[in-house]
Amino acid sequence: MSIVLTEPMTVSQVWTELKRWRLQNGNHRQITFGWFVLALDVLNMLDVVRLENGLLYKTVRI
């Protein structure tokens, strides 16, 4: 996820970019939107990403 989340994006934008990135890098196995959302939930619980005002952000660690 962090590969495609280079700037604040909506969930839909990240989903689209992730699918594009996977195809460009030879990974043709599909993942479902449900698994994608589950991954976002885990990343949020680990404080890697946050959702704010409809946009996903990478969390900056200091």
Image (cartoon, rainbow, N blue to C red):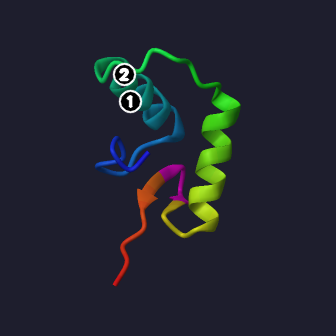
Is 35 inside the magenta-drawn segment? no
**Residue beneath disc 2:** 20
For residue 58, side relative to residue 50 (left or right) = left
Looking at the rendered structure, the kind of residue marked 2 is Arg
Q: Magenta segment range?
A: 51-55
In the rendered image of this protein, does residue 55 appear above or below residue 25? below
Is residue 52 shown in magenta?
A: yes
Q: In the picture, residue 14 is in which quadrant? A: top left
Res. 4 mark: none
Q: Position of residue 2 (x, y in %)?
A: 38, 50
Viewer-closest of 37 and 57: 37
In the rendered image, the quadrant that contains the C terminus is bottom left
Q: Are marks 1 and 2 in contact (CB under 8 Å)?
A: yes
Give the residue displayed 65% in from the left and 53% down from the top.
41
Q: What separation in Å lies between label 1 and label 2 (alpha carbons)?
A: 5 Å
Q: Residue at x 41, y 44 (%)?
A: 9
Q: What is the x, y in percent for residue 59?
A: 42, 68
In the image, what residue occupies the spot 42% across and 31% down?
18
Residue that mark 1 sits on: 17
Mark 1 lies on a secondary structure that is helix
Residue 16 is situated, as x and y percent measured from the top left of the image, at 44, 26
Neighbourhood count class around disc 2 (C-alpha, 10 Å): few under 14, some 14–19, many 20 upward: few
Q: Position of residue 61 (x, y in %)?
A: 37, 78
Quadrant of the image containing the N terminus: top left
The secondary structure type at the circle numbered 2 is: helix
Q: Residue at x 70, y 33 (%)?
A: 34
Circle 1 residues within 10 Å: few <14, some 14–19, many ≥20: some
**Principal secondary structure, stretch drawn in magenta:** strand
Tell me the amino acid under the disc marked 1: Glu
